[in-house]
């Protein structure tokens, strides 16, 4: 089966892409409006794309009339935001933040989140989040009338005490109960992991790698 994306509507493309590219990390983005109103909203078209400089990219959908939604508008105006990662302890609050509240509503208050001052940017981070990244916008790319990409530099990060070894910088995977987005209303915990060694060419030459058997 082949799906020609050029023949699909944007809605159907979103349906197929979001259903097959899974699980996706969730960026629960906190911003602050010009009047001081706190805003928080989740986005799963998100990932990190480099370390020098530390870079993340978020995809924002516009409203049907082409206007930007609150988070994208605030980032465009202020250039600053915080990406808060989502674990099982805050997934219900994250879901509340997904409600399309009016701009004057404080989503921190509605979701029961604690605003904690950031060090380098104006928007606060979510105190209950396991990991938070303070970010500054580098550039916004408008891909179409309905989709923007924001590229940003990650300036600093905050990690819940006990999650990372401060000397070796090893993450305690068992304590990082992070949640990924699937599609529609479906989410998944990342609670089963496995290890696969990255082999080197000399490992193959030495016969250490077991070739994959192809079916007859």
Image (spheres, rainbow, N blue to C red):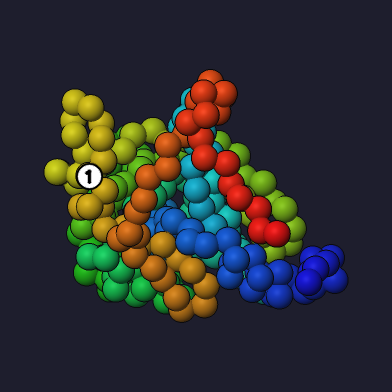
Q: In this view, does 197 lie above or below 72?
A: above
Task: Please say whether residue 16 is visible from this viewpoint.
Answer: yes
Which quadrant of the structure image shows residue 129?
bottom left
Q: Nearer the viewer, residue 151 or 20?
A: 20
Q: Quadrant of the N terminus?
A: bottom right
Element class at badge 1: loop
Looking at the picture, tell me which residue is in the foreground, 168 or 14: 168
The relative height of residue 129 versus residue 159 in the rendered view (above or below) is below
Q: In this view, does 203 lie above or below 14?
A: above
Asked whether, in this view, residue 149 is left or right of residue 112, the answer is right
Q: Quadrant of the C terminus?
A: bottom right
Q: In the rendered view, tell whether residue 8 sits above or below residue 146.
A: below
Q: Where is residue 93 in the image (x, y as percent from the top left)?
A: 29, 70
Q: Which residue lies under the disc numbered 1?
A: 172
Residue 187 vs residue 192: left or right? right
**Could you tell me which residue is drawn at 85 percent across and 71 percent down?**
7
Residue at 25 percent of width and 31 percent of height: 169
Q: Observer-nearest residue: 28 or 69?
A: 28
Q: Is residue 32 visible?
A: no
Residue at the outermost top position: 202
Give the residue at x 51% y 23%. 206
Q: Residue 96: percent from the left, percent from the top?
A: 34, 75
């Amino acid at each position: 089966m082949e799906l020609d994306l050029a023949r699909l509507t944007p809605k159907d493309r979103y349906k197929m892409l979001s259903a097959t590219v899974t699980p996706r990390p969730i960026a629960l983005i906190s911003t602050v409006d010009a009047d001081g109103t706190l805003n928080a909203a989740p986005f799963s078209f998100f990932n990190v794309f480099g370390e020098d400089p530390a870079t993340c990219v978020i995809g924002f959908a516009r409203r049907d009339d082409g206007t930007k939604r609150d988070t994208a508008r605030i980032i465009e105006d202020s250039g600053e935001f915080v990406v808060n990662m989502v674990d099982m302890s805050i997934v219900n609050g994250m879901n509340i933040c997904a409600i399309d509240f009016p701009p004057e509503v404080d989503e921190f208050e509605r979701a029961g989140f604690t605003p904690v001052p950031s060090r380098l940017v104006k928007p606060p981070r979510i105190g209950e989040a396991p990991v938070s990244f303070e970010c500054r916008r580098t550039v916004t790319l408008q891909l179409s009338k309905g989709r923007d990409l924001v590229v940003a530099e990650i300036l600093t990060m905050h990690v819940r005490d006990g999650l990372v070894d401060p000397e070796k910088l090893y993450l305690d995977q068992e304590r990082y109960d992070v949640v990924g987005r699937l599609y529609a209303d479906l989410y998944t915990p990342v609670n089963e992991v496995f290890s696969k060694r990255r082999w080197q060419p000399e490992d193959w030459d030495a016969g250490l790698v077991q070739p994959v058997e192809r079916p007859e």
